[in-house]
Image (cartoon, rainbow, N blue to C red):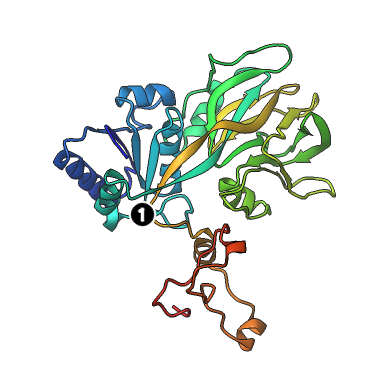
Amino acid sequence: MTVNRVGLVVHGGRAEAADAARSVRAWCAEHALPCTDIDVWRDGGRHAREEVEAAGNPDLIVTLGGDGTFLRGARLAAVNDALVLGIDLGRVGFLTEVPASDVRLALDAVREDRLRIDTRMLLALRASCRLEVPQELEAWAEYGRGRMLPAPQVRPDCETGDGWGVPLEVTALNDVVLEKLARDRQVSVGVYVSGRLLASYSADALLVATPTGSTAYSFAAGGPVVSPRAEALVFTPVAPHMAFDRTVVTAPDEPIGLRVLERSGPAAVSIDGQLRGVLDPGDWIGVYAAPRRLRAVRLEPMDFYGRLRERMNLTDAPAAVADGTPPLLWPVTTPPPADIAHLALLTVPEGHSPLL
């Protein structure tokens, strides 16, 4: 893997992130590799494409922080198909992988092409109008979060009009959320799947998540855990005032449309946790699988379910514990038979105990 320039996204509120950043800069200096810090908040107000162009179009984005920092880096990497490497300094995240102590080893692995590319589905949007945040909401949106991201631009490479809406220059790795603005009133939204009305919801929020985002807000709202390797859209209503409160999982080519009903209150549009616009009654957004994928660097095979067990602190049923102790990995050390050799299986490495 040839890397010509590194972009660095650092969580400024953590001393360990600053220490790890110094290691990255030193490594880049040793290998005569340009390295540019990208502070998306202090330099804020710029679009992702402007950020990466100002940084010299890095082909590797290194994030130092938790999942929030990774999402900021992913927003930049998705613009020009750069790789993104997440250094884990978070607490409960699923997106970052490499501990800070191994940052130089990870960079060596990238340079020596000893890496795996983990592709992740992204969401794209069309809307009935350009997204804007009213000025009176900006101070509220920035409180405790830092400077807001700018309203999405219109994609110049896409057709507009004829009722198909405005294609927005924005992608989501986790989710797109439509939520109420008035505390005392839910938002009323007609939800369409592949152009067909599914139901009209009155709810606190409605969200469309990627499989990657299924362990974020969607999970907290009662949605399913979906393998990040899957290709699907996950629609979950949040506190709906109706009997049908289930998540709906659609195929990647089945877009989900959210139309704010005529006598509803306005609704906020958040993309990966950041407020990006407000819809008035009669406005709509369409969420669909983006044509491109995020390319994340991995050093080892993904153990998503091991991380799920660890990060969610999953406990075993007392009755099951009384009946025995299962090994953490399937207790087989030999290669799988031909009929299942195509399956993604984590098994015990040869020479290791199955109970370790």
What is the quadrant of the C terminus in the image? bottom left
Specify the quadrant of the image occupied by residue 289.
top right
Residue 46 can be seen in this image: no
Count of residue discs? 1
> In the image, 38: left or right of 204?
left
What is the quadrant of the N terminus in the image? top left
- Residue 20, image x, y percentages: 26, 49
Residue at 27% of width from left, 58% of height from top?
Answer: 101
Q: Is residue 236 above or below residue 82?
A: below
Q: Nearer the viewer, residue 213 or 118?
A: 118
Q: Is residue 262 above or below residue 236?
A: above
Packing grade of label 1 (10 A; few <14, some 14-19, many >=20) is some
- Residue 24, image x, y percentages: 24, 44
In the image, farthest residue toward the top: 161
- Residue 3, image x, y percentages: 29, 36
Check disc 1 and report the residue beneath it.
Answer: 98
